[in-house]
């Protein structure tokens, strides 16, 4: 009998103990400072070993490419991350970190409409906009899919009518040119996609005006004919000073010659703010809605994509959504170890938080993707450029990196020198396509030879002995060899990811964009920050409004001596 009680007692003590460990682990990721968690500490230990290792050594393992790459045959996409400074242990520890951060659980909250943007009390549902499975998604008890589908239908009809000539300008002429007026999230996404999918364009010309600098709109208007031009005013809030100023200038340009009644045939609005759209003079019929649960920088999948649908046709716009939906499913359902956005996020985190890499380069080997780095700059830096964590405390670790880049091979003739031989440590993503859009001579082979060569050169460099050998072979004198060798040596050991896609199509582009969106989301969860607000943009906007009145002479506000001094010079030298 006693023995029985003893066994039951031991059983309960053990149960308590196990439960206690579980609670402490939970607490460690949720409440204890991130850098003190075992997951972070383990990575720190691994970093101390790895920083002494060169990619040349890591590649002695012939199996490395197989171990550290993911191929998705359906999408025709290969993600090779073998040229990163990691070993199997690093990878496991990074995945442990991701697991402890509960990335998948957080992603499911986002997809299901929970208000994960807690500083603005908003759901984050750009994924619902491309939810091609059409499964219900609820926000405040309302299924958002019917209204999303209704706007898509409206976009379909409008883009078809515009392209076919069913929709005509006020004087009965077919619309040949579209001008999208918007800024930030209401500009960068559709602008980048229109540029990227230019090859598929068979609709009207599309121009983008974003800057309040008057030359932006004037340059575009100079090329256009009022009777055949349509303006898309894209603004989530419909209060953004740059957009409204440009839209008013465009409206004057139309009405001066065609009269006020022409507005209805030459202006449409993409917005969440019906009241302001109406005040501007655009009728509800000409308004394409989206909602607070769509963040500006994640909005190209919404009504904000209207210029894309007009440019390449609605069916191809849907292909773009389908590609993104495919990536959404991959992100939600693949195990972390095979999950491309998760692996990319974890690697970025590895360099950002352990190697001290403060910048990250995006290098697409495609002329049409030349706006992709600028687009990602906003999505990444506005999302993860934050200092305050989930608990409202300042973080004591690095968060989002500086994102930059340029299309290859142009960048090679510009800044690659610094990546190869400078003192900065810059991880890079190389994006390339197996099949060209235009087959011209051997252009594509030449482009892709560079795409393959650069990551190889960055990883393996050129050793001193190799340099000396090369110079000797070239018949260079010993004294010159001595002089040149240090300059011609490449340390290598620069990490890169290679994303190799069968072809640039609306579907693969959709998937590529969603891949980066989810990478950014994953990193936000790992850093415990809110990736979906942007309070940092506000302060400058408020001050500009105050100073505008000073410049117009309506107020004379007191500023610091520098700002006041500059304003004084501006006013006294203005013609
Ligand atoms: C994006 C930002 C920001 C925004 C622009 C334009 O996430 O919020 O770039 O898109 O400031 O705002 P509107 O669409 O409201 O004009």
Image: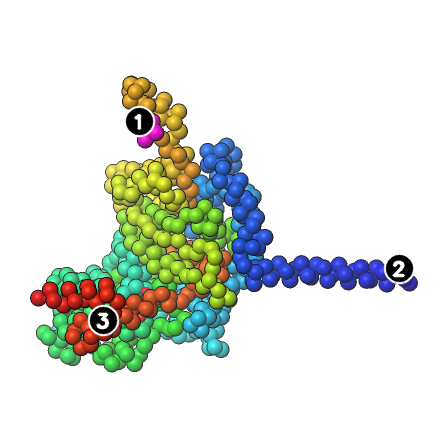
Q: Secondary structure at mark 3?
A: helix
Q: Look at mark 1 in the image and give the residue it sits on.
A: 484
Q: Residues within 10 Å of mark 1 (few under 14, many from 20)?
A: some
Q: Does the rendering let one see residue 334?
A: yes
Residue 193, compared with residue 555, is above or below; it is above
- Tell me the distance, in whole angstroms, between the alpha carbons under discs 3 and 2: 83 Å
Residue 3 numbered tag: 2
- Marks 2, 1: nearer the viewer: 1
Residue at the spot 36% in from the left edge and 41% down from the top edge:
423
Q: Which residues are magenta?
A: 484-488
Viewer-nearest residue: 4 or 369: 4
- Tell me the distance, in whole angstroms, between the alpha carbons under discs 2 and 1: 82 Å
**Identity of the residue furthest to the front in this view:** 561
Q: Position of residue 516 (x, y in %)?
A: 41, 55
Q: Look at mark 3 in the image and give the residue it sits on.
A: 547
Residue 498, compared with residue 199, is above or below; it is above
């Amino acid at each position: 009998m006693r023995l029985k009680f003893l066994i039951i007692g031991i059983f309960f003590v053990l149960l308590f103990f196990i439960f206690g460990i579980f609670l402490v682990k939970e607490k460690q990721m949720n409440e204890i400072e991130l850098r003190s968690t075992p997951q972070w500490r383990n990575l720190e230990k691994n970093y101390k070993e790895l920083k002494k290792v060169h990619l040349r050594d890591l590649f002695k393992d012939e199996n490395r490419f197989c171990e550290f790459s993911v191929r998705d045959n359906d999408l025709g996409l290969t993600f090779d991350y073998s040229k990163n400074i990691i070993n199997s242990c690093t990878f496991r520890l990074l995945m442990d970190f991701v697991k402890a951060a509960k990335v998948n659980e957080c992603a499911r909250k986002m997809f299901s409409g929970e208000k994960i943007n807690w500083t603005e009390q908003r759901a984050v549902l750009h994924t619902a906009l491309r939810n091609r499975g059409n499964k219900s998604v609820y926000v405040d008890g309302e299924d958002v899919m019917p209204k999303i589908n209704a706007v898509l239908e409206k976009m379909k009809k409008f883009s078809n009518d515009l392209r076919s000539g069913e929709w005509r300008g006020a004087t009965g002429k077919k619309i040949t040119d579209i001008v999208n007026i918007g800024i930030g999230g209401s500009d960068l996404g559709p602008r980048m996609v229109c540029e990227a999918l230019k090859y598929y364009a068979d609709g009207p010309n599309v121009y983008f005006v974003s800057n309040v600098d008057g030359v932006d709109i004037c340059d575009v208007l100079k090329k256009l004919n009022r009777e055949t031009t349509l303006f898309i005013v894209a603004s989530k809030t419909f209060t953004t000073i740059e957009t409204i100023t440009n839209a008013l200038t465009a409206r004057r340009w139309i009405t001066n010659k065609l009269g006020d009644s022409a507005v209805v045939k030459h202006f449409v609005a993409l917005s969440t703010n019906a009241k302001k759209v109406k005040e501007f003079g655009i009728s509800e019929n000409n308004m394409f809605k989206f909602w607070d649960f769509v963040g500006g920088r994640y909005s190209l999948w919404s009504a904000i994509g209207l210029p894309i649908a007009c440019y390449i046709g609605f069916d191809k716009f849907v292909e773009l959504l389908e590609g993104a939906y495919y990536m959404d499913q991959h992100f939600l359902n693949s195990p972390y170890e095979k999950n491309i956005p998760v692996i990319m996020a974890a690697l970025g985190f590895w360099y950002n938080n352990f190697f001290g890499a403060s910048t990250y380069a995006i290098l697409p080997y495609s002329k049409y993707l030349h706006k992709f780095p600028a687009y990602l700059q906003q999505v990444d830096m506005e999302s993860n450029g934050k200092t305050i964590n989930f608990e409202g405390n300042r973080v004591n670790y690095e968060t989002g990196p500086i994102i930059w880049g340029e299309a290859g091979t142009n960048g090679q003739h510009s800044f690659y020198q610094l990546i190869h031989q400078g003192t900065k440590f810059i991880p890079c993503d190389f994006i390339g396509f197996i099949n060209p859009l235009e087959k011209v001579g051997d252009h594509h082979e030449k482009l892709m030879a560079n795409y393959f060569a650069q990551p190889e050169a960055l990883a393996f460099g050129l050793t001193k002995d190799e340099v000396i050998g090369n110079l000797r072979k070239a018949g260079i004198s010993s004294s010159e060899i001595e002089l040149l060798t240090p300059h011609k040596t490449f340390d290598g050991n620069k990490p890169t990811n290679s994303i190799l896609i069968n072809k640039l199509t609306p579907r693969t582009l959709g998937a590529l964009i969603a891949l980066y969106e989810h990478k950014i989301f994953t990193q936000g969860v790992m850093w415990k920050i809110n990736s979906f607000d942007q309070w940092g943009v506000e302060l400058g906007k408020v001050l500009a409004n105050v100073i505008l009145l000073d410049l117009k002479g309506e107020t004379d506000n007191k500023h610091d001596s520098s700002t006041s001094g500059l304003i004084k010079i501006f006013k006294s030298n203005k013609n």
